[in-house]
Image (cartoon, helix red, strand yellow):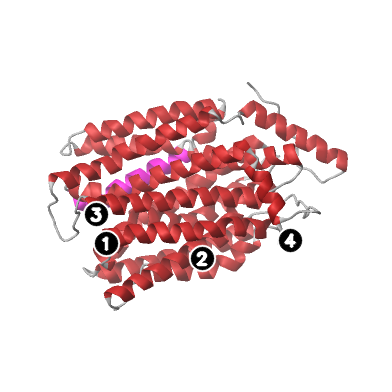
Amino acid sequence: MQLTMKDKIGYGLGDTACGFVWQATMFLLAYFYTDVFGLSAGIMGTLFLVSRVLDAVTDPLMGLLVDRTRTRHGQFRPFLLWGAIPFGIVCMLTFYTPDFSANGKIIYACVTYILLTLVYTFVNVPYCAMPGVITADPKARHALQSWRFFLAAAGSLAISGIALPLVGIIGRGNEQLGYFGAMCVLGLCGVVLLYVCFFTTKERYTFEVQPGSSVAKDLKLLLGNGQWRIMCAFKMMATCSSVVRGGATLYFVKYVMDHPEMATQFLLYGSIATMFGSLCSSRLLGRFDRVKAFKWIIVAYSLISLLIFFTPAENMALIFALNILFLFVFNTTTPLQWLMASDVVDYEESRSGRRLDGLVFSTYLFALKIGLAIGGALVGWILAYVNYSASSSVQPVEVLTTIKILFCVVPVALYAGMFTMLSFYKLTDARVQAISRQLLKHRAAQGDDLPAAAPAASH
C-alpha cells in the first residue's frame, strides 16, 4: 500500500522523542558524568556497562509482553500513551545533580540511569516493532524508516544544536543547573511528540495472539534462526562503533581540535548530515540490493574515518567537512539496519508460521544495548587507562592520541566486523520480496484482512 505523509511524519516524530534520550546518552552523558556531575571516568564506564547489561535483559521480556498485548488502541501504540509522561520525567532526573556525597551521587546516577533505560525500553520496543502493522510492503517500510530516521536526527539536532546553548542560557555559567534545565525543556518536548505519534499513526493490520505459544517456544525458534543471530551480532557491533565515536566526540573537539567553543557547530552540522543521509536512503539505495549496497558503503565510511585520523588537528575546515561527509554516508544505511529486523520477522513467519514482531525487535534492541554498554564502557575504561583527568585543560600527547583512536580507528575495526556479518546475511532484496509475496498468498488463503501485495523485485 502507499503510505501518506501523515503516516511517515507521524511515525517518525516518535523517534524524534526517543532521539532526545538516545542522542543525549550518545553525545552528552559521558561528558556530563565526568566533567559536570563529578564521577571518575572509570566509575562512569562501569556504570554504563552494568546498567546497560541489566537493562538489555529487560528487552526480550518487553518483546514477549508486546507480542501478547491486544487493546482497543492496537498492539503497539498503547505503550506510547502509557509511557510518555514517565519518559519525560526520567529524562529530566537523569541530568539533575543532587547535593549528595560522592557515594550518594554514584547511587543516584545508577538509579536514574537504570530508570532511563527501562522507560526507554518500555516506549521504544513497541515503537520500533510498529512498521509491520503499518505496511507489509518492504519498499514502503524502507521509505517509512527513512522518514523515521530523518526525524530521529531532528532529535539529534535538538541535542547538538539546542541543548548546549540551552545549558549556557539556563545555567549562566552553572553547568549543573544548565544541563538539568535543558533536559527539562527537551523532556517536555519528548512527551508531546510521543502523544503526537500515538494520535497520528494507525495499526492497519492485526495479528491475533497465536494459540499454543509460550516464552520457551518463541525463544527456541529465534535461537534456531541463523539470520536472527547474524542480525543481532551485526547490530551489537554497529551500535558499539557509534557509541565509541559519539562518546569521544566532545573530547575530540575540546582537546584534539583544541576548540571547545566549536562543539555546538560540530554536533549541529553532523546532525544535519545525519538527517539528510537518512532521508536520502530509500532514494539512493532503493534501486540496489540492500546487502551489497551496505557492504560498499561500509568500505566508504571506513576510509573517511581513517582520513579524519590522519588530518592535522589545525585543519579544522577539512575535519568538519570529512565529519559531515562521514555522517551523511553512514546514515544512508541506518534505515537498512532496522529493515533487517522487519525482514527477520517475515523470514521467521515464513519458516515457522510464528509472527514475533515484539520479540524480534526487542532482541534487536537487546543487541543494541549490549553494544551501547560495551561502547560506553570502552570509552570510560580506555580514558581511565591513559590517566585522562577532567581537571586538566591541556592533556598529554598519549591522551590526545587515544582520543583520536577512539574517534577514528576503533570504529573502523568494528566496521570490519559488520562487513563480515553481512557476508553471511542471506536476506537480499529478491529473497525478502519473495517471502513477502509468499506470506500474503498464505494469509489470503486463510481469509485474513491483508495489505496490498508487495511488488515484484526489480532486480
Residue 69 x, y percent position in the rendering:
71, 61
Q: Which mark is residue 384?
A: 3
Q: Which residue is mark 4?
A: 70
- Density class for disc 1 (Cα within 10 Å; few <14, some 14-19, many ≥20) is some
Q: Nearer the viewer, residue 380 or 261?
A: 380
Q: CA distance from mark 4 to mark 2?
A: 23 Å
SS state under label 3:
helix
Badge 2 marks a residue whose secondary structure is: helix
Place of residue 232 in the rendered image (x, y in percent of width and height, measured from the top left): 54, 43
Q: Where residue 164 sits in the image (x, y, percent)?
A: 30, 59
- Residue at 71% over, 33% down: 435
Circles 1 and 4: CB atoms closer than 8 Å: no
Q: Which residue is under mark 1?
A: 34
For mark 3, does the 10 Å Cα neighbourhood hold few (<14), some (14 to 19), or many (20 or more) residues?
some
Q: How far is the residue under mark 3 from the one under mark 2?
A: 36 Å
Crowd band around label 4 with a 10 angstrom C-alpha radius: few (<14), some (14–19), many (20+) = some
**First in sequence: mark 3 vs mark 1:** 1
Q: CA distance from mark 1 to mark 2?
A: 28 Å
Q: Nearer the viewer, mark 3 or mark 2?
A: 3
In the image, taking residue 455 as reference, residue 95 lies left or right, namely left
Report the residue at 82% width, 37% height from top: 442
Residue 121 versus residue 405 in the image, above or below: below
Front position among marks 1 and 4: 1
C-alpha separation, residue under disc 1 versus residue under disc 4: 43 Å
Majority secondary structure of the magenta segment? helix
For the point 33% across and 70% down, which residue is it?
Answer: 106
- Secondary structure, mark 1, is helix
Which residue is the site of mark 2?
A: 191
User: Type of residue at label 3?
Assistant: Ala
Please report whichever mark, 1 or 4, sits nearer to the chain's N-terminal start. 1
Residue numbers of the magenta segment: 259-278
Q: Nearer the viewer, mark 3 or mark 1?
A: 3
